[in-house]
Structures are given as C-alpha cells and as structure tokens.
Image (spheres, rainbow, N blue to C red):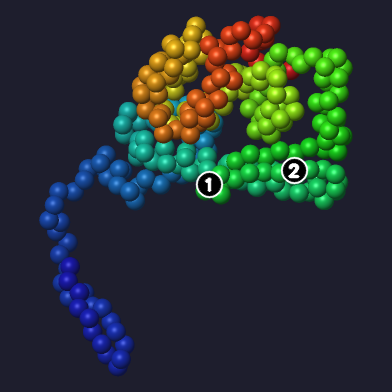
C-alpha cells in the first residue's frame, strides 16, 4: 500500500494511491493465529478461574492444563501462554494485596475516630509498599502495660526458659526488651502456612518438592549439617535473591530445630490453632 499527502485549502489529507491485496508472506494457520498478541486477551470467565486456582496454590502449568481440559482443547493449543497466565496472576496478587492493605487501614482509622484510645501503626518497605501493621484496643493496651512485670513477679522473679510465638515484629521487639532472658522461638506452623503465598508462584511445579526438602532440612540433627544443606536448598531452587528466604535464614536460630536443641519446649513447635 502506498499513501500520499495532499493539502487543499490549507487542510491536510492522506490519500491511498496504491493498494495490493496479495500478501508477500505465508499466512498463519487458524491454530497459529491464536497466539498473536491481539488474540491473547483473557476474558472475564478465565480471569475468575485463574484467580481461584492460583489462590488454591496451583502452579501455572496446572492452571493452564485445567483450563485446557475445561475448554476441551488439546495440550498446548490454548491461546494463553504460561507467560500470559503468570503475568495475570502476579498483577492480580499485587492488586489484591494493595486493596486489602488500604481497606485494613480504613478500618483502623474508623476505629480510631470512634475510640481515641485505640492505637494502630504500620510500616512500609523501601519501595513505599505496605509491609507490617499492628493495632490494639484500650483494654489490651492496659494489659500489655502491666503484663511483663506482673508475669515475672508472679513467678517470684524466675524467668521461664522459652516462649513460642509467631513472627510478629513488634512482639519480637517487646520480648527482647522486656524479657531478655527468654529463649524466643517462632512457631513453625505460622512460617510454613505462608509458603504458598511466598513461593508457589515463584517455584511453580517445583513448589511441592521445595516444601518436602524444607521440612527435611528443618528436622536435621545438627547445625553444621543444617548450614551445609541450606546452601544446597537455595542453589537447587535458585532462591538466593528471594527476600523471604533471606529473612528465614537471618532468623534461623528462632525456628530451625538444630538451633533449638537444649531448650525446653515440652515437645511443642507450634502455638496451635483452635
């Protein structure tokens, strides 16, 4: 096709002067054309299905196969590539987290407006993204103010050997400041329950294998063996730059069994669920 510029009475027009309807290349087949970018929009039904499967912890490969089976298409013939699905899942995850965070802060502000004694605070990371939040009602704050001293006093000044909690940042800081003689350990259930959010999208089909290897490493008998096999785990799953892995390793003395030997936990490694 050729076009020409024409100016008449100061007004510019573009005119087609030549058009050839014969293609100078082979056309894509019906099966191939579906993979062009223009054909790869995810409709609302598929978006909902992908979101539900992702929340259930399904890998990208499994999500794609489920949709293929539901639509009755042969493997590999779905217009959506694995990259399309992965990009959608990641964008939805980021959007949901941001929306949930904003909704939570709105609730906290509303409670503060109704009760001046209600307290809340939050932190953001280096990219100004929501990171941690803490809140407390008036009765809880009063209890916290006397908890530490009263507890130790009731025990006739004797500190317990151990305390088992989740990874709450403020709680960890409070225990370190007010009860420094405790061995503070983290509940392993609270850690592993977050693995799906932390690692399922990153690892895909390797996620279940990672969980198995992590559990095996967690139960190792000594620190030297743990350190050696931790490096192997990170290398095997290419997680050296993952921030969650870095934090787990930084706090390993508070959750890994080889580091907790010699402390009394009465056989417990979790705070339990009611």
Residue 30: percent from the left, percent from the top?
A: 26, 42
- State the residue in front, 182 or 171: 182
- State the residue in front, 30 or 130: 130
Distance from disc 2 to disc 1, alpha carbons, whole Å, reads 21 Å
User: Mark 2 falls on what kind of element?
Assistant: strand
Residue 104: percent from the left, percent from the top?
A: 69, 43
Left/right placement of residue 244 relative to residue 6 reads: right
CB within 8 Å, label 2 to label 1: no
- State the residue in front, 92 or 37: 92
Please give the residue where the numbered disc 1 appears in the rendered image: 126
Q: Is residue 123 above or below residue 208?
A: below
Report whether residue 49 is seen. Answer: no
Residue 131: percent from the left, percent from the top?
A: 60, 41
Mark seen at residue 143 = none
Please give the residue where the numbered disc 2 appears in the rendered image: 120
User: Where, quadrant-wise, is the C terminus in this rendering?
Assistant: top right
User: Where, quadrant-wise, is the N terminus in this rendering?
Assistant: bottom left
Q: Is residue 140 above or below residue 37?
A: above
View extreme (left): residue:
24
Q: Residue at x 48, y 28 (%)?
A: 245
- State the residue in front, 80 or 107: 107
Q: Residue at x 65, y 6 (%)?
A: 267
View extreme (bottom): residue:
9
Left/right placement of residue 243 relative to residue 118 reads: left
């Amino acid at each position: 096709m050729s076009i020409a510029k024409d100016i008449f009475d100061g007004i510019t027009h573009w005119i087609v002067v030549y058009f050839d309807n014969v293609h100078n290349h082979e056309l894509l087949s019906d099966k191939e054309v579906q993979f062009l970018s223009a054909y790869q929009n995810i409709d609302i039904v598929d978006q909902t299905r992908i979101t539900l499967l992702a929340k259930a912890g399904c890998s990208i490969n499994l999500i794609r196969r489920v949709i293929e089976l539901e639509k009755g298409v042969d493997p590999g013939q779905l217009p959506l590539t694995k990259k399309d699905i992965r990009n959608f899942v990641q964008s939805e995850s980021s959007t949901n987290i941001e929306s949930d965070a904003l909704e939570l802060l709105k609730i906290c502000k509303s409670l503060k407006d109704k009760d001046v004694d209600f307290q809340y605070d939050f932190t953001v990371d280096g990219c100004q993204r929501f990171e941690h939040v803490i809140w407390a009602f008036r009765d809880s704050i009063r209890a916290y103010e006397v908890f530490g001293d009263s507890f130790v006093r009731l025990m006739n000044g004797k500190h317990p050997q151990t305390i088992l909690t989740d990874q709450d940042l403020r709680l960890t800081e409070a225990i370190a400041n007010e009860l420094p003689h405790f061995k503070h350990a983290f509940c392993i259930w609270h850690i592993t329950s977050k693995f799906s959010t932390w690692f399922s999208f990153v690892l895909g089909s390797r996620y279940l294998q990672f969980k198995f290897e992590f559990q095996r490493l967690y139960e190792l008998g000594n620190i030297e063996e743990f350190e050696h096999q931790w490096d192997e785990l990170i290398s095997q799953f290419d997680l050296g730059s993952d921030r969650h892995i870095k934090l787990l390793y930084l706090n390993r003395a508070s959750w890994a069994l080889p580091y907790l030997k010699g402390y009394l936990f009465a056989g417990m490694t979790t705070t339990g669920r009611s």
